[in-house]
Amino acid sequence: MLFLLDLSASNSNSLSTENWISIGVLLVALITLIVNFFLTRSQIKTALKSIKLQIKSSQEIAKEEINRDVKSTNRMVWINELRDSVSEYVANHEYIKLASQNDSNTKTGTPSQE
């Protein structure tokens, strides 16, 4: 780009208007390049922060879903075990009740009411 500067021997001490325009264009291009560099760098940093936040949020949501699923599964297992235990208790209670009635009926000589 320096070839745009015309420093000929006839104008050795002063710069012509064309040379000032060339210098101005070069300065504007350089400033534009620097500004674009910093803006792009800022955008990249912002995008990386956003990506990190999204990843963290996704991980937290996944952990919550896993915890919820595990708790729900454990709760269902506990309920089923409780249901089985209560059912077994009631069945045993009824069996003992009938057995005691039959035993008392055989001792007193009255027939059972089945």
Image (cartoon, rainbow, N blue to C red):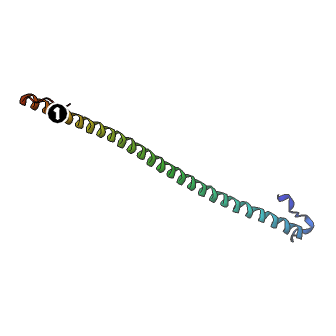
- Residue 97, image quadrant: top left
Residue 38 position, x and y percent, is: 66, 60
**Would residue 51 be found to the left or right of residue 61 on screen?**
right
* Residue 74 visible in image: yes
The answer to whether residue 49 is above or below residue 76 is below
- Residue 8, image quadrant: bottom right
The answer to whether residue 59 is above or below residue 42 is above
Q: How many marks?
A: 1
* Residue 16 visible in image: no
**Would residue 53 be found to the left or right of residue 93 on screen?**
right
**Would residue 102 be found to the left or right of residue 47 on screen?**
left
Q: Nearer the viewer, residue 21 or 41?
A: 41
Q: Nearer the viewer, residue 31 or 67?
A: 67
* Residue denoted by label 1: 96
Residue 84 position, x and y percent, is: 29, 36
Rendered residue at 44%/49% (across/down): 64
Rendered residue at 41%/46% (across/down): 67
Residue 25 position, x and y percent, is: 82, 65
Rendered residue at 48%/46% (across/down): 62
- Residue 77, image quadrant: top left
Question: Which part of the image, by quadrant, shows the C terminus?
Answer: top left
The answer to whether residue 42 is above or below residue 82 is below
Q: Nearer the viewer, residue 97 or 49?
A: 97
Three-letter residue code for mark 1: Ile
Question: Which part of the image, by quadrant, shows the N terminus?
Answer: bottom right
Q: Nearer the viewer, residue 6 or 40?
A: 40
**Would residue 97 be found to the left or right of residue 34 on screen?**
left
Q: For mark 1, does the 10 Å Cα neighbourhood hold few (<14), some (14 to 19), or many (20 or more) residues? A: few
SS of the residue at dot 1?
A: helix
Seen as rendered, the residue at the extreme right is 10
